[in-house]
């Protein structure tokens, strides 16, 4: 981990630990509660890409510990250690910390260390990627939907396939996180093929990449024309249900209100 400036610890006892959702990336969507937690913290711990989303004026004068991918547990352990040492610490995630974020593993670390009652811990909600991206697409989530991560690093692919099948069969709108990476370039195509077994080829699909960040991309197309090669880990996909329709370059899944 890279350490910037170190702030003095609290000598009176353990500090607090706040697990902070930063939202999709734009400072405009950083909630006041999250901003306050960052400003009041003495140390900020997080994935380097997410640390870069925090304005420099907030980082100034704090202990900043940034690390790369697949070091989530290391970050959780360090954040807990800092809090136990008396340092008020913010552990950050993009989006909402409780949706594929750092809230779960951090609470597990606190539990494992027997520190749940020793550290004042709070989860600070953020604007989740699915909500931010859905807004850019219009209203694709007005009815029931299922959120599925296509990453099989922690979940067996067989189980993910089962979830896609059942959700598609039940006519849920599907929201696909972690759809495709350099090391996982087959899962998205398989997910689309599964959805096509239960959904019309003309089902609207929305692709949002880099929501509310530089190089933002928003596009829509029918299910049978999903441009798999354009999708990466900065993307989120929305596959509509049987009622979802295109509104120009937007998507609408009607709730069913009488007009």
Image (cartoon, helix red, strand yellow):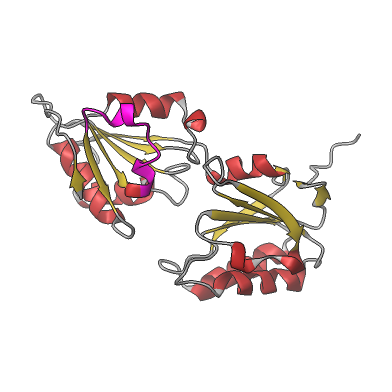
85 relative to 202 in the view: left or right: left
Residue 231's place in the image compared with 95, above or below, is: below
Residue 148 placement (x, y as % from top left): 56, 59
Q: As drawn, is 123 to the left or to the right of 227?
A: left
Residue 193 visible at all: yes
Split into 4 quadrants, where in the image is the C terminus? top right
In reply to whether residue 55 is colored magenta, the answer given is: yes
Is 111 in front, or is 222? 222
Along the line of sight, which residue is nearer the eye, 45 or 166? 45
**Image quadrant in which you'd find residue 164:** bottom right
At horizontal 67% and vertical 65% (from top left) the residue drawn is: 227
Q: Please name the residue shown 62% across and 72% down the image.
A: 189
Pinpoint residue 159: horizontal percent, then vertical percent: 52, 71
Q: Which residue lies furthest to the front in this view?
A: 215
Residue at 19% x, 36% y is 83
Q: Which of 37/54 is in front? A: 54
Q: In this view, does 28 lie above or below 213?
A: above
Q: Give the range drawn in magenta.
A: 49-62
Placement of 220 over or under 168, stated as above or below: above
155 left or right, relative to 81? right
How far across and how far down the image is residue 176, in percent? 59, 58
Q: Which of 3 and 241 is in front in this view?
A: 3
Q: Residue furthest left?
A: 11
Confirm whether the magenta stretch covers residue 131: no
């Amino acid at each position: 981990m890279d350490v910037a400036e170190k702030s003095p610890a609290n000598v009176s006892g353990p500090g607090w630990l706040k697990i902070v959702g930063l939202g999709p990336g734009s400072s405009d969507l950083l909630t006041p509660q999250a901003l306050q937690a960052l400003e009041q913290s003495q140390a900020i711990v997080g994935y380097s890409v997410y640390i870069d989303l925090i304005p420099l004026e907030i980082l100034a004068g704090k202990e900043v510990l940034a690390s790369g991918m697949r070091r989530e547990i290391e970050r959780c352990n360090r954040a807990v250690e800092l809090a136990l040492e008396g340092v008020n610490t913010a552990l950050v995630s993009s989006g909402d910390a409780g949706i594929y974020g750092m809230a779960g593993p951090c609470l597990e670390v606190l539990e494992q260390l027997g520190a749940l009652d020793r550290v004042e811990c709070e989860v600070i909600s953020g604007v989740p990627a699915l909500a931010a991206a859905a807004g850019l697409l219009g209203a694709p989530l007005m009815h029931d939907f299922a959120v599925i991560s296509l990453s099989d690093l922690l979940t067996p692919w067989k189980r993910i396939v089962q979830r896609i099948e059942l959700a598609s069969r039940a006519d849920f709108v599907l929201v696909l996180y972690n759809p495709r990476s350099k090391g996982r370039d087959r899962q998205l195509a398989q997910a689309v093929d599964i959805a096509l077994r239960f959904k019309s080829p003309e089902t609207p699909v929305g692709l949002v990449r880099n929501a509310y960040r530089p190089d933002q991309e928003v596009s829509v197309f029918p299910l049978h024309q999903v441009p798999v090669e354009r999708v990466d880990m900065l993307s989120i996909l929305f596959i509509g249900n049987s009622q979802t329709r295109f509104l120009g370059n937007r998507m609408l899944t009607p709730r069913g209100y009488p007009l």
